[in-house]
Amino acid sequence: MFTRFISLEWKAFTRASSFTSNVVMKVFMVIAAIYFLGIFLSLGFFGYDIIEKTGQDPLVIISKFMIYYMLMDLLVRIFLQKIPVINIRPLLTLPVKRGTIVHFAIGKTVLSFFNFLHYFLFVPFAIRLVAEGYDPVNVVLWWIGITALVYCNNFLNILANNKDWVFMVILAVFAGIAGLQYYQVFDITIVTSIFYHGLYATYYMLLIPILALAGLWVATFKYFRNALYLDTGLKGRHDIAETQDYTWLNRFGTMGIFLKNDIKLIRRNKRSKTTVIMSFLFLFYGLIFMTGAIEAYDNAFWKVFAAIFVSGGFLFTFGQFVPSWDSAYYPLMMSQNIKYKDYIASKWWLIVIGTLLSTVLASFYLYFGVDTYFIIVAGAVYNIGVNSYLVLLGGAFIKTPIDLASSKQAFGDKKAFNMKTMLLTIPKLLLPIAFYIIGDYIGGPTVGYAVLAGSGLLGFVFRNIMFRQIEKVYKLEKYKTLDAYKQKS
């Protein structure tokens, strides 16, 4: 049965309307994968020598800080690792055991790149340990224990993406450990190093990660098996029903209708609410660059880079998925007498409002100086006048449908990360730095910030021209987009 599932997955990939774009994206992903594999492989072979030069035992040092490595791996997985999805509805009407479906779907995560990557770090490091005279049997036991913990992170990630309380516990643990370490209240590595080094020093410590891995597999299996029904999530309990008509937007005509739909979407759906929360967190990203805490980032180039993110959190998190937010009813919209220009304008104004709110909320950066806040304002003007159009233009080519009810379904895809959006984000980050460099070359940093803001003002002035150009692209991609939104996997 597993071979039949693999065959169905391959047919779904090759027969999808986005197969060509998927292949292109796979090429870029392979290049990125080779890059990271090379980094991990180098650290695996030469990490021993680097630590040994400090006069300390490499295995002891690695075991001491392994807790932070595992926590960072888990957080990266939560935000980046894409949970495999299978279209279960056709299978549930066939004589296929639910347990088989669940085991196959969970088993797909075992083959994830995020698991495979760690082999390139720990296998070479284990080989170096054996070559340097460490006991081979104990090294193998240590490696098996670490690998089991890596797969524990894999299943914790699955649960965290489907159970909110698991995600909150993980964040709380990470924040608590980091805070206690930073303020020198308690050094968690003193305790955890005993466990991680114990995987090498003892024969019985290996049972802990093995049992934890088995327990997480069973917990994940039971959770999804119990949720594997066609009607999962259809029944809900609502004690109070509330409606909001937003009649004050009626004065804007058709564009007002789109704005009302977007506001309701943000208020009522979990995924859209998450993007708003993430855009708020972007406000604090600039603290890394604007405070001078890290000397390497204390320069104008990095500050411009940070300013784009601080004011553009909503633009990058919500705007990058236009028109995917409307994928569920996009065919219905396209069958109506609706002008694309009004649709695009409504999305643009929503992005502008989000950018302005972020800029106002970022006023606490005045504490670090008026010049610092001026950089953020310049970045906000640029986001409104240039990046907003690039986001809308990129949306015409992404064609990734969003299932807003995915949190109610087994194996629902709730990841907001997409390789296409990441690649289309590159020009949004490099162009503002290029404008700043031009202005800085002409007359110094102040002129650079003025050129950055000026390019945004020009974009705002010529917004109608930009709308017409974006509208042409949306019309050209209209039927490809409709076809892509019909894909089920």
Image (cartoon, rainbow, N blue to C red):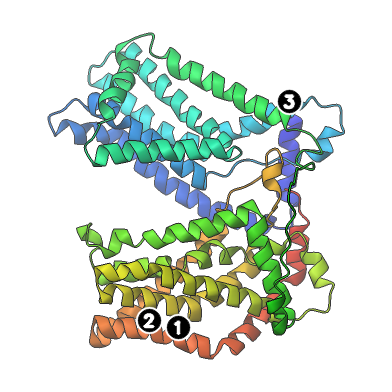
Secondary element at tag 3: helix
- On the image, the x and y values in percent for residue 189 come to 27, 29
Answer whether labels 2 and 1 touch (C-beta < 8 Å).
yes
Q: Is residue 80 left or right of residue 17?
A: left
**Mark 3: amino acid:** Thr
Residue 418 seen in this snapshot: no
Looking at the picture, tell me which residue is in the foreground, 85 or 51: 85
- On the image, the x and y values in percent for residue 397 come to 64, 67
- On the image, the x and y values in percent for residue 99 come to 73, 24
Identify the residue at horizontal 23%, vertical 17% (top origin): 133
Mark 3 or mark 2, which is nearer the start of the sequence?
Answer: 3
Identify the residue at horizontal 40%, vertical 87% (top origin): 454
| C-alpha separation, residue under disc 2 versus residue under disc 3 | 56 Å
| C-alpha separation, residue under disc 2 versus residue under disc 1 | 7 Å
Looking at the picture, tell me which residue is in the foreground, 247 or 106: 247
Identify the residue at horizontal 54%, vertical 37% (top origin): 165
Identify the residue at horizontal 67%, vertical 45% (top origin): 407
**Mark 2: amino acid:** Leu
User: Residue 452, which numbered label?
Assistant: 2
How many labels sit on residues?
3
Secondary element at tag 1: helix
Return the residue at label 3. 100
- On the image, the x and y values in percent for residue 254 come to 74, 80
Answer whether labels 1 and 3 touch (C-beta < 8 Å).
no
Return the residue at label 1. 456
Residue occupying the far left of the picture: 55
Label 3 environment density (alpha carbons within 10 Å; few <14, some 14–19, many ≥20) = some
| C-alpha separation, residue under disc 1 versus residue under disc 3 | 55 Å
User: Residue 31, which numbered label?
Assistant: none
Q: Is residue 367 above or below residue 59?
A: below
